[in-house]
Amino acid sequence: PRPGDLVVLDVTLLNKDGMVRDPRQLKQRILAYLLTCNKAPISSHRDVSLNLKKQNPKASHVLDCTLYIKKRKLDIDRQAETRLAVIKNINPDLRQFNALDQLSSSPLLSIICDPMKNTQPLPTIDTQQNLHAQIMQDRLNPSQKKAVLTVAKACLTQSNSIHLIHGPPGCGKSEVIMGIILQMWLDKRGGNNSMRILLCAPSNAAIDDIFLRLMNFRQNCLINAPKYNMVRVGRSENKSINNLTLDTIVQNELKKQKSKLNDEEEKLVELSHLEAKKNQLTYQIENLGKKKNDFRYIQTLQTKLADTIKTIKELECGKTKKVSEVKQEREKKRNMELRVLENAHIIVTTLSSCYNSQMEMAHMQKKLKWTCCIVDEATQCIEPDNLIPLMLGVNNLVLVGDPQQLPATVLSETAKEHGLGRSLFARQRDWWQ
């Protein structure tokens, strides 16, 4: 299981007296949302039920999970086995809802809701103007060259605009995307306000293809020119790209220090788990309700609380200074992620991952400024997906796609009837036609 999973829990409820366990205990199935999940090896100082150890003698790890469930009164037997089954990860769905919710604060709100307001004139370009030599302009036909020069200039000099680039498969849309990025880079190099481009697509395969093109061009063609920094956010399906993913870059930097602190990090997680248990037992003692006269029940809670506090003190006494280093290490990792993203000129990711926890943190703490966001295969995703990059404050959007290709798959007939299957690209294009 991982954060963002929608899960089903099979829990065991205690009998009315809160103490007696027997085979007739009530089983209940609960729907839950998994907020956090930490995995740690079972060790001598971990608080693991003896009953669970007997039921699962081969168990080697413990999962510490935080879950959201519907508020209800449940007296769960925490010493009994709880089974968890993952239904699906709903983080992508939640990002779509968040994108719709935050659209009202986007500078592109008016032209997204009413495409006819997208009346900002395109910048004037000299059709005889040459592209920068490194772009290999002989590979672009006149219409492609015009698109590259126009969109690149518009993104560098204007704001609050949406541009559409369309064409059938094999017509060179990827070459145009490359041309736009390189034209902006070569125009902005050496300037005080360097460019920052967010490059997205709905699928890993599409985004990895463009990333490889940009990587190869950077290595082979920008020999005597400044090279752009680029990073792949999220999981890549191509091994050639792994060294340039955000996670790999950060992990390589922290690899030596991290291996020394694994044991202390486990201890820190256990302390957090025990503190939560202490708070829960304290709450139960202070809110006895109908059981305020059940002295046996109260004594059991007090004994558990005393044992928990004792274990916490033992762990606290055994802590080394490295536990504080664990916290510093986590902070160092976050700061390094921020630094990599802040120094990147081109950030490449899928639409779903462009507002993951790392990108969200960079947006909230660094307020990154974007030259533009380019979305490839923009006709193959539903409109809420197209809106996710706008949560990062993007104010220039370039949508690239083929209107004749099949749209995104929408299973719900009701959703189809209400237009969910139509992309932002298609809706904008329909208005102008």
Image: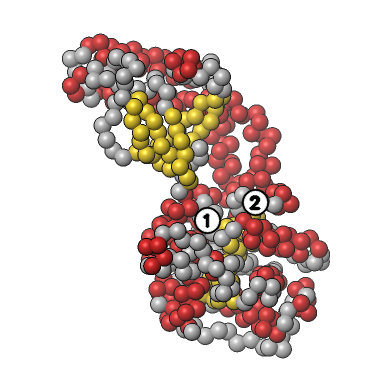
Q: Residues within 10 Å of mark 1 (few under 14, many from 20)?
A: many
Q: Image quarter for residue 372?
A: bottom right
Upstream in sequence: badge 1 or badge 2: 2
Taking the image as shown, residue 363 lies to the left or right of residue 8, namely right
How far across and how far down the image is residue 286, in percent? Answer: 24, 23
**Residue occupying the point 63% across, 75% down:** 168
How far across and how far down the image is residue 53, in percent? Answer: 49, 17
Q: Secondary structure at mark 2?
A: loop
Q: Secondary structure at mark 1?
A: loop
- Of residue 379 and residue 344, the one placed in the foreground of this image is 379
Q: Residues within 10 Å of mark 2 (few under 14, many from 20)?
A: some
Residue 227 in sight in this render: no
Residue 39 in sight in this render: yes
Residue corresponding to mark 2: 236
- Of residue 20 and residue 414, the one placed in the foreground of this image is 414
Q: CA distance from mark 1 to mark 2?
A: 13 Å
Taking the image as shown, residue 33 lies to the left or right of residue 226, namely left
Residue corresponding to mark 1: 352
